[in-house]
Amino acid sequence: MLLSIRDLSKSFPGTRALDGVDFDLRAGEVHALLGENGAGKSTLIKCLTGAYRRDAGEIRLDGEKISPSSTSEAQELGIGTVYQEVNLLPNLTVAQNLTFGREPRRFGMVDGKAQRELAREMLDGYGLDIDVGRDLGAYSVAVRQIVAIARAVALSGKVLILDEPTASLDAAEVRMLFDVIRDLRDRGLGIIFVSHFLDQVFALCDRLTVLRNGRKITTETTADLDRVKLIEHMLGHELDRASEEAATTDSVADDRPELLRFEGIGRAGVVEPFDLTIRKGEVIGLAGLLGSGRTETAELMFGVRTPQTGKTRDADGPVSHATPREAIAAGFGFAPEDRKTHGIIADLSVRENIILAMQAHRGWTRPIPRAEQDAIAEDYIAKLDIRTSDADKPVGDLSGGNQQKVVLARWLAMNPRYLILDEPTRGIDVGAHAEILRLIQEITEEGMSILVISSELDELIAVVDRVIVLRDRKHMRELTGEEVATDAIVRAIASSDHAPDAARDHAR
Amino acid sequence: MKRAFLRVLPQLLTLAALIALVTLFFPQFLSVDYQAGRLSGPVIDVLKRGAPVALLAVGMTLVIATRGIDLSVGTVMAITGAVAAWTISAGWGVGAAIILALAAGIACGVWNGCLVAIFGIQPIVATLILMTSGRGIAQLITEGRILTFTDPAFAWLGSGTLLGIPVPTILWIVAAIATVVLMRRTALGLLVEAIGINRAASALAGVNASVLLIAVYMASGLCAALAGIIATADIRGADANNAGLWLELDAILAVVIGGNSLLGGRFSVAASVLGAMIIQTIDTGILLAGFPSEYNLVIKAALVLVILVLQSPNLADHWHFVRENVRRRREPEPSPDVKS
């Protein structure tokens, strides 16, 4: 056994993140680590890499007890880690990144030629044909990821931990990365693979271990396990059948009263002018590839970027949404894609995060009384099943899915008429996923209209009444009723009708 | 209430330890006399001389809470002092002098705030502009001279007493309390903390970040104006070159000793003014203890270093560890975790 962990425990104030976890990693295997957010995956990894000190238990590497107290110590012992956000320096060259901290020297100066030579040797066998003298930032995320892996393998060489390595890669890049990982496995490395994508786990991993609420549930051989069984292990309960419920609501869509009408809203270089009518209680999906203008559409609607053209009206007349404050006053809400930088205020408590939009709307002179704040926070913590030890815990200490629920709670507390959710389930686990989809349905039953942006078509189809397909910063097609199905959307995204090209030529 | 007390406890302990240390060298440090209707003694002296830095620290705390910094406050003291002295010399009276000086302070704050909030200039650079150019403005007002005056009513603000207590002391305490009440009895404190932690997310939640930013720099300017009035009234003259010189650094130090993070977010005005008193106790204590004056700055630096090291977050983990151990020893059976 290359790496064996016995009875590992780690507590934080108010939570028991890991509770007597066992974990084994063989040399020459890819071992998936799975679990919902808050299951303890990242805590386990941080204990392994020395970022956290464990409270109890032992870690053996090659039979010897280790207890790394820093990432560099773990690296020297042979445990290398590559994170989702690659922790390399994009403004240095590939060679400088690869040899960082151990540059070959000549007369006390860095020897550039030897450095590039060393870098080329390190990249040998990764099937990467790149110029090591160029800045790392010039290459795609996938290449950067492989460079990070090459560096980790060269530095450590026994255990490689990959934390969500595929989160921002496209299909071809994922295949490229998987080839590299399989090759490293065959060279005898033990690889721990953390991912939310079950398909990838089944495609790549030899064994998998499931964690739930800080405990190990099971370790199984991937080939012996089917998907339903795995999801049951991860959730501990049956998946909500959100999709079946959704299918029945489609037929009533059309006679609902109109809520908002966006006419010719657009901004040069952001999104071409589009029309969109939103009915009361309707869920609209925006589909398209990254960079197709989905997020930008949401930003124009919420005044994050001010529209240059068009106007918006509701039943009572024109609606102004040139700034977020105006949009909020008009009854809009927006849960942005990047939760950490645009959603939560990490150091504020769960309670303060939930009441923030409400307080900002009331104005500073009318503070929400503490008792009312507590009541609102407790209410939404219960309603959305936000898992936190108490309402005064900093929201940054919560897991991703719970943070997302806090952002949702912030807007639900405002009771908006139109709520925009940009990738509401990005980076959160299967269980919270199903819960958020269920919430979306509950909200609309109360008459709120929702715009959902998502890269996961299954998820879109499960909740939406209509889908708008975007391509090249332009609203291309609207799919309704029967048309709302994966293959129809994919065809619409991929279809090469020449209308947009002609329009572009015309513009030139 | 308990939470607020725990927040300032380290500063209170530091202050107590310092007072004990100074008393060791100068036993009469805590003695207070009451003569001719005014209190006097080393402690009263600390409370009075610490007034400018305490006032600056009040405004600086708010600016730092938004993840900013205001380097111009010392200069704003010089400008507002010059404005006050000029107004008195021109014979417009005490009321006009105070109002014009405060208005000048607010104007300086608006200038800084607009550079930061509207033009997006980094706070340290934005306020550096006024820090360096402001003394020139003050010199233009005083026409390059030290502008002296003999208005007893205005001088009272710097050296007078009310109910036996020096007026500057009353001014900084009232300013600090008013700020705490304004921040914590309204939602301002929460909103300021929110934009300090994550301005982008706060703006998306509808917080009017730009207006709040300008407001905190205005508050800082206002506090600096009060400090400028006190300094000018105390020496009965406006010295454009030396009024408030380097005090911005003491104010920042006071905020830091108060345990407020320079990265913004959670703040405590009470802890900052205690920080200002800690600095003043060190200054006064060194003088009273009778060290040769060339040692003053070295001793001050050493004491500040010790205080900051004791407060460092890395050490805080160890304190926490020690405390946990003590608690565990006291209650042998750890309470069963109900939630799991």
Image (spheres, coloured by chain):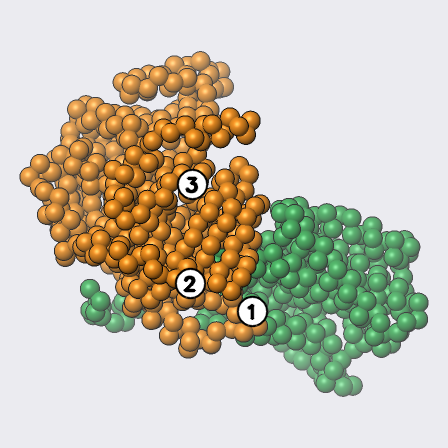
The quarter of the image holding the C terminus of chain A is top right
Q: CA distance from mark 1 to mark 2?
A: 24 Å
Q: Residue at x 39, y 24 (%)?
A: A99
Most distant residue in the right direction: B90
Q: Give coordinates of residue B278: x percent, y percent.
A: 60, 65
Kind of residue sitting beneath label 3: His
Please name which of the two marks, 1 or 3, marks the residue nearer to the observer. Answer: 3
Tint applied to chain A in the drawing: orange
Residue B248 appears in the picture as rendered: yes
| Residue at mark 1 | A364
| Residue at mark 2 | A417
Q: Is residue B317 above or below residue B268?
A: above
Q: Residue at x 51, y 46 (%)?
A: A264
Q: Give coordinates of residue A287: x percent, y percent.
A: 35, 42
- Residue situated in front as seen by the camera: A472 or B190: A472
Left or right of B32 on screen, residue A309:
left
- Residue situated in front as seen by the camera: B39 or B85: B85
Q: Is residue A68 above or below residue A356?
A: above
Chain for numbered disc 1: A
Q: Give coordinates of residue A71: x percent, y percent.
A: 33, 39
Chain for numbered disc 3: A
Q: Earlier in the sequence, mark 2 or mark 3?
A: 2
Chain for numbered disc 2: A
Kind of residue sitting beneath label 1: Trp
Q: Which secondary structure lies at badge 3?
A: strand
- Residue situated in front as seen by the camera: B145 or A306: A306
| Residue at mark 3 | A475
- Chain in green on the image: B
